[in-house]
Image: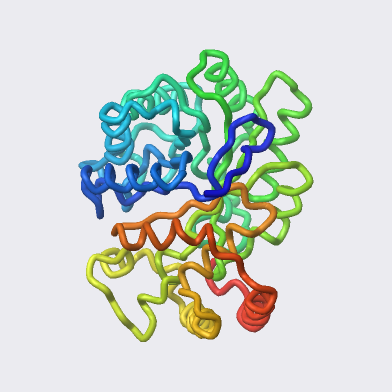
Amino acid sequence: MKYTRLPHTDLEVSKICLGTMTWGRQNTESEGHEQMDYAFDQGINFFDTAELYPVPPHPDRFADTEKIIGTWFKKTGKRDKIILASKIAGKAEFTKFIRTTGFSRASIIEAVEGSLGRLQTDYLDLYQLHWPERTTNFFGKRGYEHDISDHWQDNIHQVLETLRDLVREGKIRHIGLSNETPWGTMRFLEESKVHSSLPRAITIQNPYSLLNRLFEVGLSEISMRSKIGLLAYSPLGFGVLSGKYLGGMKPANARITLFSAYNRYSSENSEKATQLYYNLAQEHNLSLAQMSLAFVTSRPFVTSNIIGATTMQQLKENISSIDVDLSDEVLKGIEAIHGQIPNPAP
């Protein structure tokens, strides 16, 4: 395994982070435990979860993923060996069953306390705002369209005050953003810069893959210059970049097969690009999944690459991508395809 540091901290994390959002829906508790056992044995010390998981969200399965991680901690006693990240859900129609969501002081405190209880831990190493409260471009929306009906009032200072108090109480150590825009990222960074008592966001968890490199437009410069590390999610585009859906295939129990609404990586252009990337990988005796993951991991603004799997075979292949070094020829091939079909998935 390879390691790096979370920006502005002394926490050393694996360059591969174990994603968990299928546990409790597509994976059982025992399968989740098996994945954590294997990942830990391979040197992964960074787990990412959220109160919203598993997805798709449903009241009957609310926060089951965190509960599965908590029982693993209780069984193994390895909490102190894991850098643990979780998230608070933002406002959305599909989160109303959780509570009155949003980032009021009461909501944040309730969310943190709930996660700590389910995870059977006293603290979270990284606590992230899962998506912005304001109406902006997230979850498959390519660009910003101003919504005059959005009455969001800038409460970033108040949000950071609440998070600061939770840091002082020892319940969270650091904070991060997720599904955030360049404007939102700089707004958070500026607030903590002007008010030094407020915690500074150290990471941003956004989608990044061969099918969606939009992070490179604006956010990558912020990441490099302001040292806020990308935790890249969906590096395989819901499994599309494994090649398993090519040619109209619908493998049993696969995410897009089970949940057809999760189709943001399934456009005609995405399929065309995936086929080209598959061909490139084959030319260089690489699996498409490992080429795709190795590309993400190698980017200088990526702090950690969040991989997820529903089978042990997938997990093993994904983790072993850490040992794949892409040649200049492969990288040139990737850029050629990107130039031909740039960012087909929003």
Determine the image quadrant of residue 72: top left
Q: From what the image shows, is residue 214 above or below residue 113?
A: below
Q: Nearer the viewer, residue 328 or 102?
A: 328
Where residue 161 appears, as percent x and y from the top left, is 61, 21
Where residue 292 appears, as percent x and y from the top left, is 53, 68
Please state if 147 lies on the left or on the right of 197 as rendered: left
Where residue 302 appears, as percent x and y from the top left, is 63, 52
Residue 180 seen in this snapshot: no
Determine the image quadrant of residue 329: bottom right
Q: From what the image shows, is residue 327 above or below residue 120?
A: below
Please state if 223 lies on the left or on the right of 205 as rendered: right
Residue 215 seen in this snapshot: yes
Quadrant occupied by the C terminus:
bottom right
Q: Which residue is at 53% across, 53% downward?
A: 305
Please state if 98 lies on the left or on the right of 218 as rendered: left
Q: Which residue is at 69% across, 50% downward?
A: 182
Q: How is the image coloured?
A: rainbow
Where residue 315 appears, as percent x and y from the top left, is 37, 57
Q: Which residue is at 72% across, 42% downward?
A: 227
Q: Which residue is at 48% across, 40% downward?
A: 46
Determine the image quadrant of residue 189: top right
Q: Nearer the viewer, residue 23 or 81?
A: 81
Q: From what the image shows, is residue 346 above or below residue 228?
A: below
